[in-house]
């Protein structure tokens, strides 16, 4: 038995399949990440083929069969195509990195409406705001790590439980969490956090304005989060989109 299902989806990636079809990886509102076959997508008459491009937010109808790995896409209507993201190389690079994280690190067929809504919100922000794309990406990355179970701990020193003081130099152990300057000598430190980097991460976490921070700090924050993820998921080799689009 196959069911006819209507849901929303973001296209994560697309590849050619046989003569005129495509296989799409989608992040859907109701079923999480799924793969669909889009028959005839590359035939000149297909209007859907144009709509079903990576990044686009769609309303879709699929024929879904649980026993099948590839579902069948029946129709697709465009909700948003985020035109400003596609115009700007930097916006595009960081937006593709968001899609890459979701494609690589979420399980198939696992509903996560919070993540779906977070994805739509961040693509909308990337498209409409004048904030630097790397900062917008950092906001998503911090949220995403928490969502998939690898939250960055920024509250208290893991050893003495004291609040972290302004001006203190801090250290992070990817297994245990954050340490104050008095305690960090007793633990393996995987990443040193300057006060500037710590304050920046707090701003991201609390969704505050980050205008006063250096661009370098936004880069360091991404490197920190990428290293944290590599530590916990050895198969994850880093974000490829950063290197394919310069
Ligand atoms: Zn301490």
Image (cartoon, grey):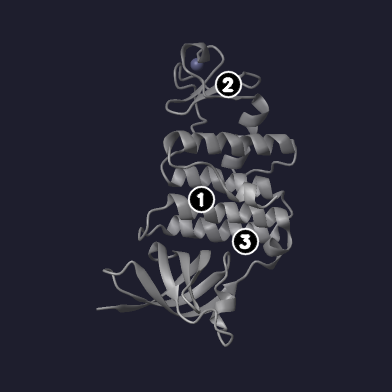
Which image quarter holds the N terminus? bottom left
Q: Is residue 244 above or below residue 46?
A: above
Report the front residue among 93 and 205.
93
Q: Of the numbered discs in the image, which one, if any, rests on residue 124?
A: 3
Could you say which quadrant of the image residue 222 lies in?
top right
Report the front residue among 108 and 145.
108
Q: Give the distance between the C-alpha atoms of the residues marked 2 and 1, in whole angstroms.
A: 27 Å
Q: Is residue 75 left or right of residue 123?
A: left
Q: Return the x and y of residue 224 as percentages of the image width and height.
A: 57, 34
Name which residue lies at 54% across and 11% down: 182
Mark 3: few/some/many CA within 10 Å (<14, 14-19, 20+): some
Name which residue lies at 48% across and 32% down: 153
Report the front residue among 209 and 149.
149
* Residue 213 visible, this angle: no
Q: Return the x and y of residue 130 as percentages of the image width and height.
A: 74, 54
Which residue position is annotated with label 2? Answer: 170
Which marked residue is nearer to the observer: mark 3 or mark 1? 1
Q: Secondary structure at mark 2?
A: strand
Q: Are marks 2 and 3 in contact (CB under 8 Å)?
A: no
Q: Secondary structure at mark 1?
A: helix
Q: Is residue 193 above or below residue 87?
A: above
Q: Return the x and y of residue 184 as percentages of the image width and height.
A: 52, 15
Q: Secondary structure at mark 3?
A: helix
Which residue position is annotated with label 1? Answer: 101
Which marked residue is nearer to the observer: mark 2 or mark 1? 1
Q: Give the distance between the C-alpha atoms of the residues marked 3 and 1, in whole angstroms.
A: 17 Å
Q: Earlier in the sequence, mark 3 or mark 1?
A: 1
Mark 1: few/some/many CA within 10 Å (<14, 14-19, 20+): some
């Amino acid at each position: 038995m196959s069911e006819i299902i209507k849901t929303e989806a973001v296209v994560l990636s697309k590849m050619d399949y046989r003569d005129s079809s495509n296989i799409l990886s989608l992040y859907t509102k109701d079923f999480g990440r799924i793969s669909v076959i889009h028959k005839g997508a590359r035939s000149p008459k297909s209007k859907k083929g144009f709509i079903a491009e990576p990044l686009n937010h769609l309303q879709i109808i699929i024929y879904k069969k649980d026993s099948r790995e590839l579902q069948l896409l029946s129709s697709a209507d465009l909700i948003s195509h985020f035109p400003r993201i596609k115009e700007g190389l930097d916006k595009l690079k960081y937006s593709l990195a968001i899609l890459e994280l979701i494609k690589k690190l979420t399980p198939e067929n696992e509903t996560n409406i919070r993540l779906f809504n977070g994805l739509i919100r961040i693509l909308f922000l990337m498209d409409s705001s004048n904030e630097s794309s790397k900062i917008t990406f950092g906001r998503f990355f911090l949220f995403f790590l928490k969502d998939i179970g690898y939250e960055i701990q920024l509250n208290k020193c893991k050893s003495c439980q004291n609040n972290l003081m302004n001006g203190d130099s801090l250290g992070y152990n990817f297994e245990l969490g954050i340490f104050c300057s008095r305690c960090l000598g007793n633990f393996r430190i995987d990443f040193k956090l300057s006060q500037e980097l710590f304050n920046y991460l707090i701003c991201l976490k609390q969704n505050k304005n980050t205008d006063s921070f250096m661009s370098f700090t936004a880069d360091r924050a991404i490197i920190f989060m990428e290293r944290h993820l590599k530590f916990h998921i050895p198969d994850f080799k880093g974000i490829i989109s950063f290197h394919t689009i310069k």
